[in-house]
Amino acid sequence: MLIGELSQRTGVASRLLRYYEEQGLLVAGRGANGYRDYDEGAVLAVRQVRALLAAGLSTGVIREVLPCVRGERPEVELCVDVRAILGAELTAADERIEELGQRRAALAGLLVERVR
């Protein structure tokens, strides 16, 4: 299928699909005319990438774990190193949450100071 059809079927802009390809998240063949040619599996791959992006993973991390992703939901098989990679991402997310909590408390404190 051409990039326009993949875009329609997934709801993802063609420009973003090309970016996914550049990042190694999506593979396209080339037709005789030089146009990108995606197989049926590309629809599932795009949906998996979108779900992993929604979970907060970077494209670099997604590239590492994508070979272990199954289904549209998606489910991640804990292949070699995937547990460590996702564990590190979870730890980083927890640290960002803690930092945001501290920032929120500081901002709330500034508002309380102003109201007085």
Image (cartoon, grey):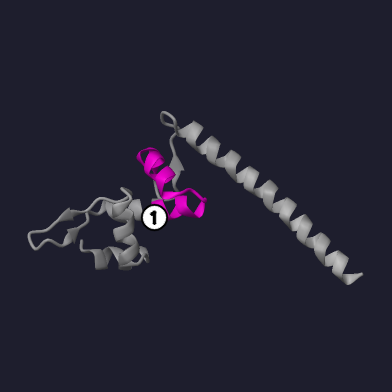
Report which residue position mark 1 lands on: 47
User: Is 102 or 4 nearer to us in this picture?
Assistant: 102
Question: Is 115 left or right of 70, judged from the image as shown?
Answer: right
Residue 15 lies in quadrant = bottom left
Horizontal relation, residue 82 to residue 20: left or right = right
- Residue 112: x and y in percent read 86, 65
Instruction: From the image, give the main secondary structure of the stretch colored magenta.
Output: helix
Amino acid beneath label 1: Arg
**Mark 1 element type:** helix
Q: Is residue 98 above or below residue 87?
A: below
Provide residue 83's location: percent of width, then percent of height: 49, 32
Query: Furthest residue to the left?
Result: 32
Q: In this rendering, is residue 25 above or below 11?
A: above
Image side of residue 110 versus residue 48, left or right:
right
Give the magenta range: 49-70
Quadrant placement of the C terminus: bottom right
Q: Taking 38 as reference, is 81 above or below it?
A: above
